[in-house]
Image: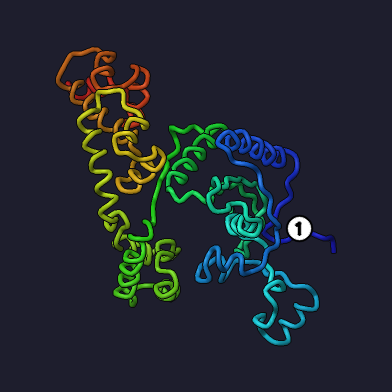
Amino acid sequence: MQAQKAEGTRDLIGAEMRAWQKMQQIAASVFEPFGFKPIETPAIEQVDVFVHGIGQSTDVVRKEMFRVFSGANLERVFTEGTDTKLKPKQRLALRPEGTAGVVRAVVENNLVPQGSTPFKAYYAEAMFRGERPQKGRLRQFHQVGIEWLGAPDPAADAECIIMLMEFYKRLGFDLSKLRLLINSMGDAQCRPAYREQVKQFILDHADEMCDECRERAELNPLRAFDCKNDHCREIMADAPLMGDNLCDECREHYEQVKRYLDSNYGEDINLDQLAALSHLNKYYLSHEFTRYYGISPINYLNRRRIEVCKNLLENTDHDISDIAHLAGFSSQSYLAQSFRKSCGMTAMEYRRSRRE
C-alpha cells in the first residue's frame, strides 16, 4: 500500500508554500517596527505547559491535544491505563497553540526580570490539534501570532489589534470589507462575578442545555457561548453580557471621553488628544473604550459626524465639501468613503432620497 499523508494534514507545495512564505515576510515587516522579535519554541512541550497556560478545563487540553509518548512509556500507559505515574518530563504533547510555549520560554529563560522592559515576540509555526478534519480545519495548521509579556497595561492588547489590521491590509485584504469585532472578558475585578452569573444562568436552564454545556457550567461556563448546538446558542443569546457587568472604574473613564466626543465632533480630534484628556495611555484608552462601548473612539467619532452630515444634507443646501468641514471630516474624500461605508450610498444619493 502506498504511503499517504496523515488525515487532516496537507503538503505545502508551489503556490501554497509561496503564500506561507509571503505571510511570514509580511508578518516580519509589520511586527518588527513595533519592537516585536521572532521566536521559535519546540513543537513538543510538557503537557503541564498547556495545562497551566490554557487551563485544565478547556476543550483544547481535555479533548484536542496530541499526546506524545516514547515507546517504553507508551507501553507503560497501556498497561497501567493512565499516565499519571509518569514524570512531568515524560508527559509530552504537540503544541496546540503558541502562547503557552512562549510564556514557558520567557519564564524559563528569565526574559522579563523585575524592572525590565516588556518582552515582545512573534512566531509563525505549525500547530497541532486532534480535531475532526473538515473544510478549513486541519489537524496540523500554520499560525502567525504575537505575544507581549510583562506589560500589565491593557494598551498592549490595543496595539496588537492595530498591528493585526495592518497585517491584513498588507496581505491584500480590503479593510472596508472586514468587520473587526472586539470583545472582553473584563479584568480581575469584573470577571469572577461575571463568570458566576453565566454559571448560574446555565444552571437555571440546565434542562434545556446539552450535556457538554451542563459540564461546562462547573468547569468553564464561558465556553458555553461557543457551543455548536443550535438550541444552546439560542439560549445563550439571553445570557448576561460582560458589557453590562463592567466595574465602576471603566464606566467612569469612558463616560468622560464619550461626552467629549459628542461635544467636539467638529474638531480635528485624534487618539493622542483623547488620551491626554483622560490621562490614559492612548492604546489603553482605545482598548477599554471599545471594550465598554463596542466601538473604537475614532469610529464612534466618525459615526457621530455621519449623523451631523445626514442632518445637514437633509436640511441645508451646503456643498458636500462644506458639510465635510462642518462635520469635522479632514477632507471631502474621507467623508465620501466614511458615508458610503456607513450608509451604503453616497452623500448626494442620500440627499436626493430624502428630498424626493
The quarter of the picture where residue 92 lies is bottom right
Disc 1 is placed on an element classified as: loop
Q: Residue furthest front?
A: 115
Q: Is residue 90 left or right of residue 31?
A: right
The quarter of the picture where residue 245 lies is bottom left
Q: 341 and 47: which one is in front?
A: 47
Residue 172: x, y in percent?
A: 56, 32
Q: In the rendered picture of this protein, how many numbered marks are placed on residues?
A: 1
| Quadrant in which the C terminus is drawn | top left
The residue carrying pointer 1 sits among few (fewer than 14), some (14 to 19) or many (20 or more) residues within 10 Å by Cα, namely: few
Q: Residue furthest bottom?
A: 80
Task: Name the residue at 85% across, 64% down.
Answer: 1
The quarter of the picture where residue 29 lies is top right
Q: Is residue 324 left or right of residue 161?
A: left
Q: Is residue 87 above or below residue 221?
A: below
Task: Name the residue at 58% across, 53% down.
Answer: 113
Residue 106: x, y in percent?
A: 62, 55
Residue 10: x, y in percent?
A: 71, 52
Q: Is residue 35 visible?
A: yes
Q: Is residue 124 above or below residue 128?
A: above
Q: Is residue 235 above or below residue 327?
A: below
Provide the residue designation for mark 1: 5
Q: Amino acid at mark 1?
A: Lys
